Image (spheres, rainbow, N blue to C red):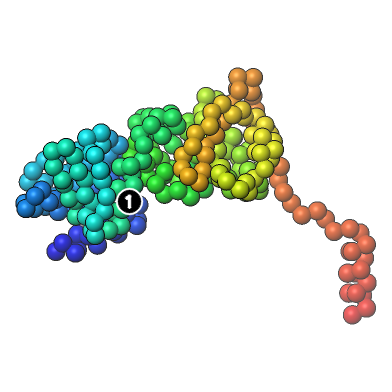
Amino acid sequence: MFGLRLARNEASWAAADYPKGTMGLEAECTLRLGRKKHTGTAVLDAESLMFRGDIELKLAFESIRSVHVEGDELVASSAEQETRFELGKTVAERWTKLIKLPKELFEKLEVLPSSNVAVVDISDPLLVTGLRERTASVSEGRVAPGTPVIFFQADTRDALRKLLLLRARMTETGVLWLVLPKGPKAIAEADVIHAVREASLVETKTVSISRAHVARKCVIPPEFQGKPVRRPPIVSLPPPPPDALGVVENVTAKK
């Protein structure tokens, strides 16, 4: 029976199934407190780890001194006790990482519980899951017109071309977080500056979001608010030169 619950937990995580309008993650769980076991549901939200079943338990992140994974268990230790959540290895590992994500990061990113967020080409699943836990709505890939907060990752110079398209979807007071790689640059700084200016945006803030990536806050300056957005150019193949057409016609005629 326990193995079936773990399998369901693993499947739910793989499917990334977040009920509309909900915040936080849930998983079937066996809770261990000392020698006693309790069956119920574990809930992870932005500030605490909870258990709901024949007993109720809530561990605020600030009260957790250490958290790690042992086998299929997430082990959380506080000053009072050690609590073990049997969740399955994959879920336990992901939840442990989410608990360790600093709350200050999302405060620096100015993400609120009421925020509606769109993420485009973001490669870090922990960032996306953290946003889902802390906001009212997160859409992946699709950006509806008027989306107030957009996270967009560009790892190459060509990827920066999407900035113009995303700029057209922003609200006048909206924010676009441009996520870029750290370390050896796949994108030159001059290319980033040029792409931001081409989209009629300005950078106002930089936040380190992981060891691999940094996020730059881009907004529409007052002088460009209320003005029509320049549409990105349509890339098409140029017509062949007349000489090339003549060669084709001559070959056809000879046949």
Picture coordinates of residue 161, whole percent (x, y): 65, 43
Which residue is located at x 49 percent, y 37 percent?
208
Picture coordinates of residue 249, whole percent (x, y): 90, 69
Picture coordinates of residue 110, whole percent (x, y): 43, 29
Picture coordinates of residue 251, whole percent (x, y): 90, 74
Q: Which residue is mark 1?
A: 94
Which residue is located at x 24 percent, y 60 percent?
71
In the image, 185: left or right of 255? left
Furthest-bottom residue in this view? 255
Which residue is located at x 48 percent, y 31 percent?
148
Work out whether residue 170 or residue 176 is closer to the camera in this orientation and state it: 176
- Name the secondary structure under disc 1: helix
In the image, 145: left or right of 51? right
Within 10 Å of the Cα at label 1, are there few (<14), some (14-19), or many (20+) other Cα atoms? some
In the image, 112: left or right of 57? right
Work out whether residue 102 or residue 246 is closer to the camera in this orientation and state it: 102
Residue type at mark 1: give it. Arg
Residue 214 seen in the figure: yes
Residue 22 seen in the figure: no
Check the picture and name the quadrant holding the C terminus.
bottom right
Which residue is located at x 48 percent, y 44 percent?
211
Check the picture and name the quadrant holding the N terminus.
bottom left
Work out whether residue 225 or residue 94 is closer to the camera in this orientation and state it: 94
Image vertical order of residue 165 relative to residue 12, above or below: above
Q: Quadrant of residue 79?
A: top left
